[in-house]
Amino acid sequence: MLPPLSGSTSPVAGDGKGAVQTDYEILRLLRQMTTDAGFSHFMVARPPSSDVQRFQDRLILSNWPADLVRQYDQADVFAASLLVDRVRQTRLPVYGDIALMLSADRRQDHGLHAAFTGLGMVSIFAVMMLTGDEQGVVLTLAGSRALPDADEVPRLYFSLLQIMDRYERAMASRVTATERLSMREVECLRWAAAGKSSDEIAIILGISAYTVSSYFKTATRKLGAVNRMQAIARAIRLKLL
């Protein structure tokens, strides 16, 4: 039986036993929950949008091997996958064969089915959850175990919901606990989100490319991100852009 996460401790309390402050702690919770549920792999990603289709640009967290992430991204099947199509049509969990990660046209397999099953990713359990910015995220658990029965489905769903709630609260708390982004930092992130390079942003804002890079570094630090793309994603999620 899947053990529930503790609900008695505030997920953002600075010294609370159940506090979540970093992506590492979220990864730890996801790994533990995935293992306890009998799965081996997890993935959290934003669904494709009209302007951002690539899988790696939508990926938030996962324990997929890097080679699988690259292969899945290069195959460019995420937006056309059966999984994305089905989770957009329902708020209920979706589960079945790992083929859900592929498009309906199996001729466009690109060797992915063999790659998934070779890693023991045979079955998949997935949900779409709305986030604070109402864009939503797709969470998947995959492994070689049998599909969950009617009694286990709500437990899996609630555990994933608790983890996402902790993540959202930690992100909100992190920004309020740190200094606010400056106007220039927001402008740089906004233009980068629109697809502009550092050199183009420098011309638009009338500053040097070095200064633009400096703004990106400070904005990334303030948002607790590891790179520019993650900083942009977090700023959007927190409604800073």
Image (cartoon, rainbow, N blue to C red):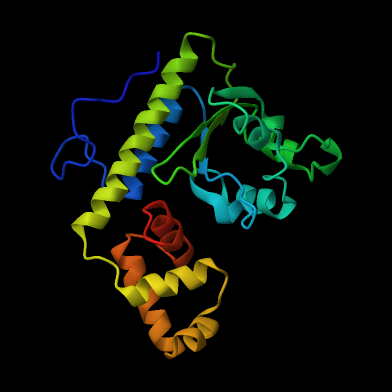
- In the image, residue 226 above or below residue 47: below
Q: Quadrant of residue 112?
A: top right
Residue drawn at 34 percent across, 19 percent down: 3
Give the percent coordinates (x, y) of residue 49: 61, 50
Q: Is residue 173 left or right of residue 238?
A: left
Q: Against 171, is 206 above or below?
A: below
Whole-percent x, y for residue 20 in the image: 26, 42
Left or right: residue 9 compared with residue 164: left
**x and y percent of residue 65 in the render?**
57, 47
Viewer-proximal residue among 35 and 165: 165
* Residue drawn at point x = 66 percent, y = 52 percent: 73
Q: Residue furthest left?
A: 15
Counting every numbered tag in the picture gives 0
Q: Quadrant of the C terminus?
A: bottom left
Q: Is residue 45 above or below residue 163?
A: below
Q: Which image quarter: residue 10?
A: top left
Front one among 22 and 228: 228
Residue lying at the far right of the rendered structure:
107
**Which quadrant of the figure contains the N terminus?**
top left
Of 166 and 238, the residue lying toward us = 238
What residue is rendered at 54% in x and 22% in y?
92
> In this rendering, would 227 be left or right of 141?
left
Residue at 41 percent across and 74 percent down: it is 187
Question: Residue 40 in the image: x percent, y percent?
Answer: 52, 31
